[in-house]
Amino acid sequence: MTINHSVFRDLLLSWYKVSQRFLPWRTTTDPYKIWLSEIILQQTRVAQGLPYYERFITQYPTVIALAKATEQEVLRMWQGLGYYSRARNLHSCAQTIVEQYNGIFPSNYQALLKLRGIGPYTAAAIAAVSFKEVVAAVDGNVYRVLARIFGLTEDIGTAYGRKQIHQLATILVDQIQPDTYSQAIMDFGALQCTPALPLCSTCVFQLYCIAFQTNRQKTLPIKTNKLNKKKRYFDYLVIRYKNTLYMTKRTSNDIWKGMYDFYLLESKCRLELDQINDPLVALVQKHNIRINTAKKEERHLLTHQSLFVRFHTIEANQSFLKDGEDLLNAYTLHPFNQMEIEILPKPILIQNFLKNSH
């Protein structure tokens, strides 16, 4: 039988009273802290995101403090979390709130939605938790919980499937305590109704859950559009001279914008260095400089891309640097010592290489 909407709310809120996670952003209605936690937890597990949240709050206790930081400082704080566009949007959004709203967050869903980096889910979460607006915050946890309990079989990879979930989610929001309800359903999906191994034997919805009754926990929600990951082949030339490494800031609208890495060669398939027509490779060969290629090719997985990465270390000399000065400048490659490198924002792939190459 389909569960009554009020019974659903009552059972969910009763479960939450006993089973909720005690998280630092749960003890406040400060929209800055709610917003920061939501941005960090996009594509990130709570266990991984919590230390970042605490460091950000310590370093930037208010949205004004965050707005005053440089993008490079914010990216460096974000290093290791991935999806770095989140950090750039976070910083830009903070500046907008300070410049256009006098440091005060907009207090409703529609206004929040206009801010950079704040999508429908994040806007709804802030509006519900900070301002008690009756609006549904629908993330992957909510899709899963509602599809299973109510037996929704529309593909959530389609616009219609998502609309169906959103309509139901909106009806279910508790009118009196939308803040508690929103946190409850997110926690229920994260702790009880988990993707792979839901805890059905102790579930408060066991008598009502259509997925449990029909043994479809593994198939609901239905999502058929699988990501077709693009393969990219990277060869990094790591130019070392004495106690410095030559690095460059990524500026194109690609992955890791604003982060620092090394001279990069990209190919459509895996090639050896001597198969790549490149001026720096030619310069290395001209000066007969030995290239130390890492034995292991690194595989780095992003949401839409698979990177296959090799690192080639070049021990440069003065003659090589003088001959290649124009080339290095053209690629904005500059020497940084170890202390300088430490404070540069770097993709975790580069950070791991540096850590393992000492």
Image (cartoon, rainbow, N blue to C red):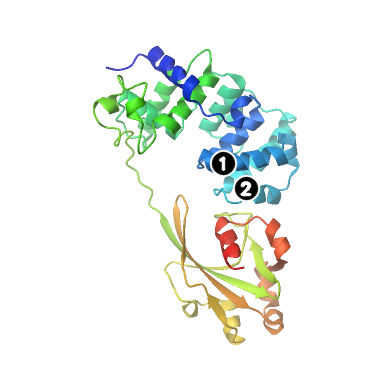
Label 2 – label 1 distance at C-alpha:
10 Å
123 to the left or right of 101: left
Quadrant in which residue 258 is drawn: bottom right
Give the residue type at disc 1. Gly
Q: Nearer the viewer, residue 325 or 24?
A: 24
Give the residue type at disc 2. Trp
Q: Is residue 260 above or below residue 121?
A: below
Residue 96 image offset from top left, x and y in percent: 69, 36
Picture quarter with the N terminus: top left
Q: Residues within 10 Å of mark 2 (few under 14, many from 20)?
A: many
Between marks 2 and 1 in the image, the one whose residue lies nearer the viewer: 1
Picture quarter with the C terminus: bottom right
Q: Which residue is mark 2?
A: 78
Q: Nearer the viewer, residue 191 or 177?
A: 191
Residue at the left extreme?
A: 214
Residue 197 image offset from top left, x and y in percent: 35, 37
The residue lying at 50 percent from left, 27 percent from top is 137
The residue lying at 39 percent from left, 17 percent from top is 8
Residue 108 image offset from top left, x and y in percent: 60, 23
The residue lying at 67 percent from left, 41 percent from top is 56
Q: Which residue is mark 1?
A: 49
Residue 280 image offset from top left, x and y in percent: 59, 77
Secondary structure state at the residue bearing disc 1: helix
